[in-house]
Image: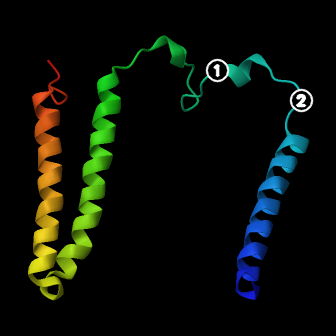
Amino acid sequence: MESYLPILVFVVVAILFVAAALIAARLFRRIGSGSLDRQPYECGNEPESFAHDHQFSIRYYLIAVLFVVFDVETIFLFPWAVMFDRLALFGFIEMMVFLAILVVGYIYVWNRGALNWA
């Protein structure tokens, strides 16, 4: 039980810091909110329209999610490439299975037309 004491202290201190930040934000906030607080800031220029007036295509979200998925793939490929000579055949087969799953996912996304903008 003594080995968990530093972890408990760390968690309690983290919770106290978060609570202190939230309390300080509540205490020092501006009471009155004017009309300028509700307008978007565009580098000192007058805003042309409000943000909720523009509708974005869901394809932007889909492309962002696909980017994150394939970016994480790159993160997993880097350590494998660094340790390639030590992993031998098992590491190679394991990474080929991982890449095959990603290629199947990519082909699925391509066939569903998620990458077509027409």
- Which quadrant, please, contains the N terminus? bottom right
Between disc 2 and disc 1, the foreground one is: 2
**Spot occupied by residue 65 in the image (x, y as percentages of width and height):** 33, 40
Residue 97, image quadrant? bottom left
Local secondary structure at mark 2: loop
- First in sequence, mark 2 or 1: give its number: 2
Residue 3 location, quadrant: bottom right
Mark 2 belongs to which amino acid? Ile
| Pointer 2 local density, CA inside 10 Å: few below 14, some 14–19, many at least 20 | few
Q: Position of residue 115 (x, y in %)?
A: 17, 30
Q: Is 12 in front, or is 22?
A: 12
Residue 31 image label: 2
> Which sits in the foreground, 53 or 104?
104
Q: Pointer 1: what residue? A: 39
Q: Nearer the viewer, residue 79 or 47?
A: 79
**Horizontal and vertical percent for residue 99?**
14, 58
